[in-house]
Image (cartoon, helix red, strand yellow):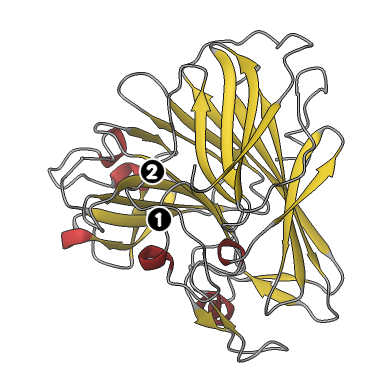
């Protein structure tokens, strides 16, 4: 897939420039009535995206009962955060100590640095950007968000720059957790190889099992792909699909709506899928996570040769499109339907 596959005509895309308020929530609002997209985020909580809604008010991201609260560097992600919505994981997912190279001995916290530190919002013409600088590694990570009501999509453009004179090893994972519903269908080509790190009761296979996605069973002998979520089952599971031939997947709900992801396969050749059906902290969500490799732990990835390396003073870019399905074809917004930006404090 071309690195420029997400470029869209400026006639079709309406964006914004803004300045972030202190400890506030940013809401990007594009269009009106059914032709609408609403995205909410908290830059001070690791650039977290808390909500993605369509024009009917339908929420697609998960929301846990935990309140949003300040994050401190070194936290444990599942225990110390709300464990919902969309976070960015870089330069690792699992906490680790870098085992070799110029950064040997550097400790990287759970789910990486980005989700643990405040991001700075930048104002630029016709786009919304925010960025964060590494704490223990010398990099600058930027995310730019575009909203498109033509195909009801949120487009994420990324750029990470190595600010130092030594190559930086890294893992990246896009980390959206979607609302879990019964009888969801997951689109991945049947022939795609999948690795199963774990599943409760080993219902997907023993840890480390590798098989075709189409051969996964749901525990009752039925095709897993046709029903990947059973609410309140108490199960939890994860598999990693790849290497992929194409960077795309979709999650279909029985009501007819759903979400689709497209991304730069050359940069993110794997898809991790994580789910809890009430089995972890009584949460119900499913994560579709395009990622750089099959390992969550940067130290393991380095030892296995699956980690990425960002050369000194060099940059890496990629794009991800999150599309809401089942909303029909939306007409272009009128010229006066600009992106509206609202800010409010966390206590509101």
Q: Seen from this angle, which residue lies furthest left?
A: 220
Q: Earlier in the sequence, mark 2 or mark 1?
A: 2
SS type, badge 2 = loop
The local crowd at label 2, few if under 14, some if 14 to 19, many if 20 or more residues have their Cα within 10 Å, is many
Q: Position of residue 217 (x, y in %)?
A: 22, 45
Tell me if residue 68 comes above or below residue 170 in the rendering.
Answer: above
For this view, does 290 lie left or right of residue 182? right
Q: Position of residue 167 (x, y in %)?
A: 77, 77
Residue 148, located in which quarter of the rendered image?
A: top right
Residue 332, located in which quarter of the rendered image?
A: top right
For this view, does 252 lie left or right of residue 204? right
Residue 308, located in which quarter of the rendered image?
A: bottom right
Tell me if residue 143 comes above or below residue 99 in the rendering.
Answer: above
Tell me if residue 217 comes above or below residue 138 in the rendering.
Answer: above
Tell me if residue 20 comes above or below residue 55 in the rendering.
Answer: below
Residue 175 appears in the picture as rendered: no
For this view, does 344 lie left or right of residue 272? right
Q: Are marks 2 and 1 in contact (CB under 8 Å)?
A: yes
- Mark drawn on residue 63: 2
Q: Residue at x 23, y 59 (%)?
A: 205
Foreground of the two, 305 or 347: 347
> Which residue position is annotated with label 1?
82
């Amino acid at each position: 897939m071309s690195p420029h596959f997400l470029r869209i005509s400026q006639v079709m895309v309406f964006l914004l420039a803004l300045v972030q308020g202190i400890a506030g929530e940013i809401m990007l609002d594009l269009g009106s009535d059914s032709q609408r997209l609403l995205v909410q985020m908290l830059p001070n909580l690791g650039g977290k995206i808390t909500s993605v809604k369509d024009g009917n008010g339908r929420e697609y991201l998960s929301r846990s009962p935990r309140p949003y609260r300040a994050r401190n560097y070194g936290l444990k992600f599942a225990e110390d955060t709300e464990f919902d919505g969309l976070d960015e994981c870089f330069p690792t997912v699992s906490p680790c100590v870098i085992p070799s190279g110029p950064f040997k001995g550097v400790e990287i916290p759970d789910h990486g640095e980005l989700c643990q530190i405040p991001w700075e919002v930048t104002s630029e013409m016709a786009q919304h950007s925010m960025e964060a600088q590494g704490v223990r590694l010398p990099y600058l990570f930027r995310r730019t968000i575009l909203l498109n009501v033509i195909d009801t999509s949120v487009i994420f453009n990324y750029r990470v720059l190595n600010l130092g004179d030594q190559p930086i090893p890294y893992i990246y994972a896009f980390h959206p957790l979607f609302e879990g519903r019964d009888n969801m269908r997951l689109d991945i080509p049947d022939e795609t190889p999948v690795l199963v790190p774990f599943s409760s009761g080993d219902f997907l296979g023993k840890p480390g099992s590798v098989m075709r996605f189409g051969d996964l069973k749901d525990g009752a002998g039925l095709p897993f792909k046709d029903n990947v979520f059973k609410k309140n089952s108490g199960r939890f599971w994860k598999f990693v699909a790849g290497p992929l031939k194409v960077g795309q997947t979709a999650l279909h709900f029985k009501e007819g709506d759903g979400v689709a992801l497209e991304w730069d396969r050359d940069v993110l050749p794997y898809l991790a899928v994580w789910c809890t059906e009430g089995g972890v902290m009584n949460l119900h969500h499913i994560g579709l996570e395009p990622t750089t490799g099959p390992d969550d732990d940067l130290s393991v990835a380095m030892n296995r040769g699956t980690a990425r390396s960002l050369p000194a003073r060099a940059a890496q870019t990629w794009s991800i499109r999150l599309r809401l399905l089942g909303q029909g074809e939306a007409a272009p917004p009128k010229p006066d339907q600009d992106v509206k930006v609202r800010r409010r404090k966390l206590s509101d």
